Structure formats: C-alpha cells, structure tokens
Image (tube, rainbow, N blue to C red):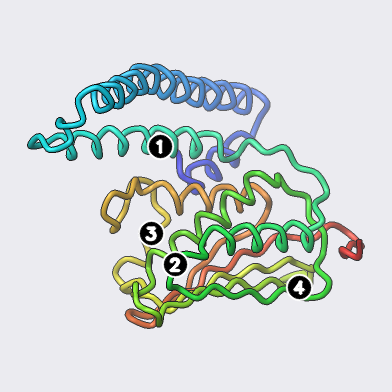
Amino acid sequence: MFTTTNLDKLKQIMAESDEHADTIGGLIASYKETISAVTHEIRNPLTLIYSSMQLIESEHPEIQNFRHWNALHQDVLYMMQLLTDLSGYNNGLTLHKKDLNTSAFIKQLVLSFAASSEASDIEFTSCIAPELPSVQADASKLKEVLLNLLKNAFEACPSDANGSVRLKADTITHTPGNNIHLRIQIQDNGCGIPPEQMDVIFKPFVTFKTGGTGLGLPLSKRIVEAHGGTLTVTSETETGATFTILIPACSDSSDTE
C-alpha cells in the first residue's frame, strides 16, 4: 500500500528523467488497476453472499437466534466496508476539481449533518465565518472527508448529554508564503487520542476502534493532500481532539454569492 511519503519519493525519482517518469508512472497505474480489479472481484461474490443471508433471514426469521449468525452477519458487513474503504483509498488521488463556493458548500453540509444527528444526545454546533475563500476542490471527496471526521468525532464523545462536537470554518493566512487558506476544524470533547497513537493514526490499516478498517483517516489525509492541503490533529487524552484541514484558496477569491 503506497503512503503519501512513498508517492512523494516516487515523484522525486520520476522528476529525474522522462524514462523514470514513464516506468514508474506505468507501475503506479498498473498497481491501481490491480487493486481496483481485486476489490471488484471480491465485492461481487460477497454482495451475493450478503443478499443470500438477507433472503434466508426473510424466509427463516428464527435463524437470527442461531449461535454465530449475528457474528457472521457482522463479519460480512465488515468485509464489505473494508472493500469500500480500500477502493476509496486507492482512488483518493483521483480528483475532479472545480471552483467551489465553500460558504454554501459547508452550510449545506452542516444542515444535512445536523438533521441526521438530531436523535443523538451529543450537541452539534458550527461557527462559519461570514465570508470564506473559494477553493479548487472535488466537492464529493471533500464532503466525504468532512463527514468521516464528524462521524469519528461523534463516536469519540461520551454517550451522555455532555458530549459535544463543533465545526468551525474560517480563513487564515498560512505561512510560509503568506498564502490565504480555507481552514476547517472539527473539535470534540471525547476520549482524545493517546500520545503513543498520534504518530500512527494516519497509517493505513492501523485502527484502535472496534470494527474499524483503519482506512478512514488515511483516506481523508490522502484526499486533503491531493487538494494541496494538510490534515493535522491535536489532542489530549480524555479532553478531546481537534482535526484541522487547510486548503489553499483560489487566487483573488472570496465567496460572496
């Protein structure tokens, strides 16, 4: 599995000569095609297995009480999620970017997420600056990143009425270069991330969450970096975590529509 560091090193080698670029470019394309093909070939029969299980349940509801049936059900769902996440990670660098009105985009996402989390005891709030810069972005993939981070934040919070998640969006001048960036922060007051885990949470297949695939955060980081941005985290155990996304703004842009 290629990490961002691996790809950066390969790009450096590719820059040395056209021959290197052609050879490595071909290898990367072949690697991605292989991962996509394997994922596709495994997902198809697995989907059939899951459909058959649902059919069995509908015809014989009593099977849900059989020993190991629920475990089998969860294992199949986990494998399907793993394949979905693996496919997403494999294609995380493929973007369809266009100028994005970030004010409208984030407001709509916040409204949608708030509606979907109404039944939760966790408080969800947002603070969106009046004007935000437009960015060159793949809206679908950026939405995927934000929803993943929000979902993680909710899962990290206590289940009682004291849990809270906050999304903040504003504009900052980021150094070096004094370039304007869109900043999106997602903060929770949950369990936090232990210091020994901070260096590995963005590595593929590393997870400390029951039922997790270990690809959500690496995929999010890969997508943000493909936009020329950064995804970082600060945290203290038992006091929560803050994930910060920085994406460079379009030249001379601000969303005023």
Per the model, the C-alpha gap separating discs 2 and 4 is 30 Å
Question: Which element carries disc 2, helix, strand or loop?
Answer: loop
| Mark found first going from the N terminus, 2 or 1 | 1
The residue under label 1 is 1
Q: Say if mark 3 contacts mark 1, CB within 8 Å.
A: no
> Mark 2 or mark 4, which is nearer to you?
2
| Mark found first going from the N terminus, 4 or 3 | 4
* Amino acid marked by disc 2: Ser
Question: Which element carries disc 3, helix, strand or loop?
Answer: loop
In the image, taking residue 116 as reference, residue 67 lies left or right, namely left
| Mark found first going from the N terminus, 3 or 2 | 2
> Mark 3 or mark 2, which is nearer to you?
2
Q: Say if mark 2 contacts mark 4, CB within 8 Å.
A: no
The residue positioned 72% from the left and 37% from the top of the image is 96
Q: What is the number of the mark on residue 201?
A: 3
> Mark 2 or mark 1, which is nearer to you?
2
Looking at the image, residue 120 lies above or below residue 79? below
Looking at the image, residue 196 lies above or below residue 30? below
Per the model, the C-alpha gap separating discs 3 and 1 is 15 Å
Looking at the image, residue 147 lies above or below residue 204? below
The residue under label 4 is 171
| Mark found first going from the N terminus, 3 or 1 | 1
> Mark 4 or mark 1, which is nearer to you?
4
* Amino acid marked by disc 4: Thr
* Quarter-of-image position of residue 255: bottom right
Per the model, the C-alpha gap separating discs 4 and 1 is 34 Å
The residue under label 2 is 120
* Quarter-of-image position of residue 158: bottom left
Question: Which element carries disc 1, helix, strand or loop?
Answer: loop
In the image, taking residue 64 as reference, residue 117 lies left or right, namely right
* Amino acid marked by disc 3: Ile
| Mark found first going from the N terminus, 4 or 1 | 1
